[in-house]
Image (cartoon, grey):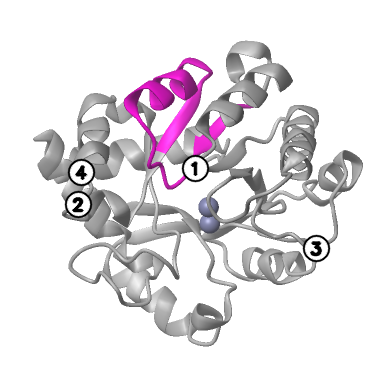
Amino acid sequence: MYIDSHCHINFPELAVRLPAILEKMAENQVSHALCVSVNLPDFPQVLALAEKYPDIYASVGVHPDYEDTPEPDVEQLVKLADHPKIVAIGETGLDYYRLQGDLEWQRERFRTHIRASRATGKPLIIHTRSASEDTIRIMREEGAGTDAGGAGGVMHCFTESLQVAEAAISMGFYISFSGIVTFKSAKELQAVARAIPLECMLIETDSPYLAPVPHRGKVNEPGLVRHVAEFLADLKGMPLEQVAQQTTDNFFELFHIAR
Ligand SMILES: [Zn+2]
Ligand SMILES: [Zn+2]
């Protein structure tokens, strides 16, 4: 059994062929998926998927790459998160790669999400790109981690250094690996995945993006998360079954989902 801890199956590329996507999940023993919110106008679709399908969970949040979109406040996020299928706040974080200039608004938006996470007890899904120093600093300042009474969360689609991974882990965060770790060029990231304990790891697709080898360049989907698990098992010299089981247990534990 595998779980895709981060996908965007509400995006048009995937939403139009949802029955085939769910079938492919079943074929590959991918039992659950978390459909991650990126903005408020599309949130009703994300929620509708989680309400319709028992094995799909959802989050609420506004992605740092969305510039011209309604800005959430803490109260609003807390209210929207008050639903049994909404298991996380995000995705949120900082992205200095896609956007440049004065990004104070990104940092403010990130703080809003951390405050909503602390208020609801629902963990954060954090996106960080070319911004790890500020990301870790704000996580500490706002008490995002379980070490500071926060709800913790996951550093999703992780591509940073071992030092950043260890800083997040010390705050009670999980590290999630996507298909990027399977890419031939990802030697440094593979070394990070080898070094950190399986007890801190999740797997994800971030579909429709970032299809893992051997599907690189194609449209990604939750059923392909299995390739990430297979790659990690090889990399860490562990039985595939152990990687599947532990990452599944980690998912249920982090998002407080009773089995
Ligand atoms: Zn992301
Ligand atoms: Zn995402």
Mark 3 Cβ and ligand 2 under 8 Å apart: no
**Upstream in sequence: badge 4 or badge 2:** 2
- Magenta stretch, residue numbers: 151-175
Q: Residue furthest bottom?
A: 16
**In the image, what residue type sits under mark 3?**
Thr
Which residue does the numbered mark 2 point to in the structure image? 185
Image height check: is 119 above or below 40?
above
Determine whether the residue tagged by mark 4 lies in a helix, strand or loop: helix
Which residue does the numbered mark 1 point to in the structure image? 259
* Rendering coords of residue 142 (x, y %): 73, 21
Q: Is residue 165 magenta?
A: yes
**In the image, what residue type sits under mark 2?**
Ser
**Upstream in sequence: badge 4 or badge 3:** 3
Q: Nearer the viewer, mark 2 or mark 1?
A: 2
Distance between the Cα atoms at labels 1 and 3?
36 Å
Which residue does the numbered mark 4 point to in the structure image? 232
Which residue does the numbered mark 3 point to in the structure image? 69
**Upstream in sequence: badge 1 or badge 3:** 3
